Each structure stands twice: as structure tokens, then as C-alpha cells.
Amino acid sequence: MLVQPAMTALADEPSPVGTDPVIGTDPVIGTDPVIGTDPAVGPGTRAVIAGLLVLTAMRVDLYAGVSLGTVVGIALAPAWLPRVRRFSGGAVFGGIVATCLASGVWLTALASADHAIVERQVWSWTALMAGLVTTVGAILWARTVFADATVAVLFGIGMVAEISPSDLALANPWKSALSIPLTVLLLALAWMLRKRWLEVLFALLLAAVSAANDSRSHFAMLLMATAFVVWQAWFRGGRRRGSAWRAVVVIAGLGWAVYSMGQALVLDGYLGEETQARSAAQAEAAGSILLGGRPEIGATAALMAERPVGLGIGTRPTVQEILVAKAGMTLLGYDPNNGYVERYMFGELVELHSIIGDAWALFGIPGLVLSGFVAWTLLRRASTGLAARDLSALMAVLVIRISWDLLFGPLYSSLAILALAVGLSLRRRTTSRDREDPVPLGSAGRR
């Protein structure tokens, strides 16, 4: 009987891999899932850090993209900036974002000779990218004090608190406003409780609600995350070193299997007749549901070939560039003459419905570097986590979600979840100060 061992593994806590006395059971993320890493920090400081984390997740807008969390985070920068150096890649991430902003301003100035410039977008995107760095900094600061799962719970609380009555009044509130915050909070709680069976239960429940509310991509992501958790529970063995590349193969294989299964379920009508009809039309037009559902890919490729350096923040595309984008979408079997292109994609500036496309349009080549850094950081986190059998369902969803958004999700709507994914994926350095820290409670007993 193979089912019984798998269910027994799901009911157990994650296997104790890793022997570093400084960072507990998970050297990849640098903290025990239950116990924080710096118990010497006082309750007042912990409350400030927790409050900052919730505020940055809420994104309470004050003016032109400036949020309350960004303002408070900048005021507390002297406290969290030194902690960024404790994480490999933290300073690099900040430097890349700063380079993106400089490039975006320069490209805007360059384009101003023959393009219209929307000044409020220049200020807005400057504030939004500053907020991205501030949020990642707050997450890294919190990780030096709280367990990673606790950090995720606090962030999830902020995301849920941001949900407004107007969000609930939308035509599909689950797909537009509820799915991501509730997924983060519920899976973070399961991670904090260290119950894999609870992670699987929550993930499947969230997937079922997504399927019932026409959220096809989120449904597939949750199924894939569930597959990762079950796979880790089933195959408990493995080495931290030497198996990371094997884990990459597992990621690719499970991803393709879940995509194929999800496409089959959709096209066979298991997610509803309306979803089936729309997906079938998309697959027939472009050859696959992915390309049919995201014709902006064609516009991105065409614009990159037309203007490789990018456009800049606040730069409004010309009529010629819009025609080039439409031609690229036509190649995928999509009819761009329906108002969507003019109103949404190019209504005021370029919106290419992908992190890669938007980052390139706004910041040029540095935007592609930023996208590459994010992809590399998340892939490393997922591969090492799977190799060690300690990748939580939430981290799996975050990696899958941002990987999807890199190709198919707008940068603006991805900023909060992007900050959480990057902030939790950066690896903690082992320093002399860390070696003097006490061993996290409970870690020695699990070895």
C-alpha cells in the first residue's frame, strides 16, 4: 500500500535537514519555521517591525503612487538598511531597482523629443519602485527577528486588510481581489503550524474555489503547489547538495503535468461551459490556451524588435508603435481592433501584461536584468527547497505565481506579491555575529 506511507508523511512535520547550529533547520531561508532568529530584540522593536510589514502589504495610497507603508519604511530606513547586507542578493536587488529608475528617467528624456510624456506616471512609477525596495527591505528586516512563516502571516494580514467593500462589489471579487490575499494568509498559517496535511487541505480548498470562480491560472498554480508538497512528503529522502538540479527537472516535469491536466479539465468542461468555450476559442486561434489568452506577448515581441532600448516611465507610445504592437498580436490570431489595445494597453503608457514586458518598456535593458534576477532568485529558492524537502506550499505558490507573472501578469498588480516572493527567497548570510546567536529552540531536538 503506497497511499498509507504518503499520508503518514503528510501528517508529520517537515524532515529535519541541515545541521547549521546558527540557522536551524533551513539554511536556505535562514530561520526555523516556528522560532524567530533573534530573540534578543525587544517587544517594542518587534511591534514596530510587525506594523511596518502590515503597512507595506496594505499599500494605502497617499498620493501619486506613494503609500503610507513606503513613507514609514523610508523613515525607518536607517534601521533596516544595515540588515539587508545579511542576505545574499539583497543589496544587488536594491542596486538593480535604482539602476532601473535611472534608466527609466533617461529613456523618458530621450523619448520626449518625439513622444508625449505623462509626468504623473513618472512620479508614480518612481514612488512604486521605491515602495518595492522598501517592502523587500521590511521583509528582510522582519526575517532577522521573526520566523519566515510569521513574516508571511503578517504580510498576509496586511494584504487581507487592504480588501475594500468596492473590491467585494466587483463582478468576480475572488478572481480580482480575494484569491491572492487569502492564499497568502491561509498557506502562511499552515506553514507556521508546520502541518503539511493542512497545507494540502488549504491549497485544495483554494483551488476548488478558484475553479468555481473562473480563476483558471490560480487554480492551476494551487494544484501545482499541492503536487510539490505531496512529492516532498512522499519522497522524504534526498541530499541538500547535488540534488538541486534534479529538483529543477522535477519542477519542470510537475509544471508540464499540471498544465496539461489543467488544460484537459478546462477543455473537457469540468470548470464550466463558459470557461470551456472561451478556452477552446483561445486554443484554436493561437494554438494554445497560453498564447490565445495572452496575445500581449505578440505585442511585446514586436515592440522589442522595433525599439530595443525601451520607452521609459511616463512615455506615451506613438501611433506607429501601437500599429507595430497590433501587428504582433495579429500573428497570434488575435483581432486587436476591439478597443482593448487603445484603452488598456496603450491608453496612457505601455501596459504589456507581463513583468518582463512592462519592466522593459518602463526601464529598458535594466528592466530585463531585474526580471532575470527575480527569475534566478526564485528558481534557486524552489530548487534548493525541493532538494531539501522543505519547500512550503506558500513558497511554491509564490514561485509559481511570479514565474507566471513574469510572462503573463502586469508589473503593477504584481508588486506586492513580487516583494514577498523576493523577500522570502533571498538567502541569509552566515556571519560571525550569527554564530554567536543561540540555537533556535527545538532545532537541536529534531536532529
Image: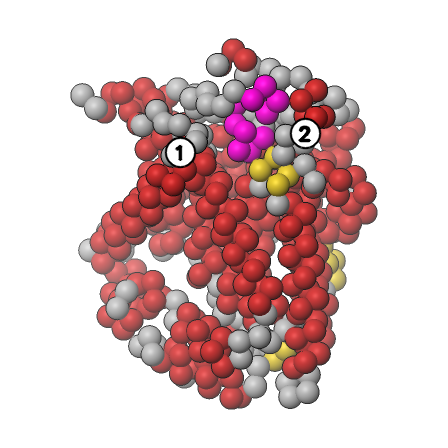
Residue at (29%, 71%) from the top-left corner?
Answer: 286
Q: How far apart are marks 2 and 1 (CA)?
A: 24 Å
The stretch of residues the image draws in magenta is: 20-30
How dense is the environment of label 2, judged by Cα within 10 Å: few (below 14), some, or many (20 and up)? Answer: few
The amino acid type, in three-letter code, at marker 2 is Thr
299 or 81, nearer to the observer: 81
Does the magenta segment cover residue 28?
yes
The amino acid type, in three-letter code, at marker 1 is Gly
Against 116, residue 381 (above or below) is above
* Rendered-image quadrant of the N terminus: top left
> Can the viewer see residue 156 in this picture?
no
Label 1 sits on a secondary structure element that is loop
Kindly indicate the quadrant of the structure image that contains residue 120. Answer: bottom right
| Image coordinates for residue 239, horizontal then vertical, percent | 40, 27
265 horizontally vs 251: left or right:
left
- Give the overall secondary structure of the magenta segment: loop
Residue at (44%, 43%) from the top-left corner?
Answer: 397
> Can the viewer see residue 81 in this picture?
yes
Which residue is under mark 2? 431
Does the magenta segment cover residue 396?
no
Against 216, residue 190 (above or below) is above
195 or 419, nearer to the observer: 419
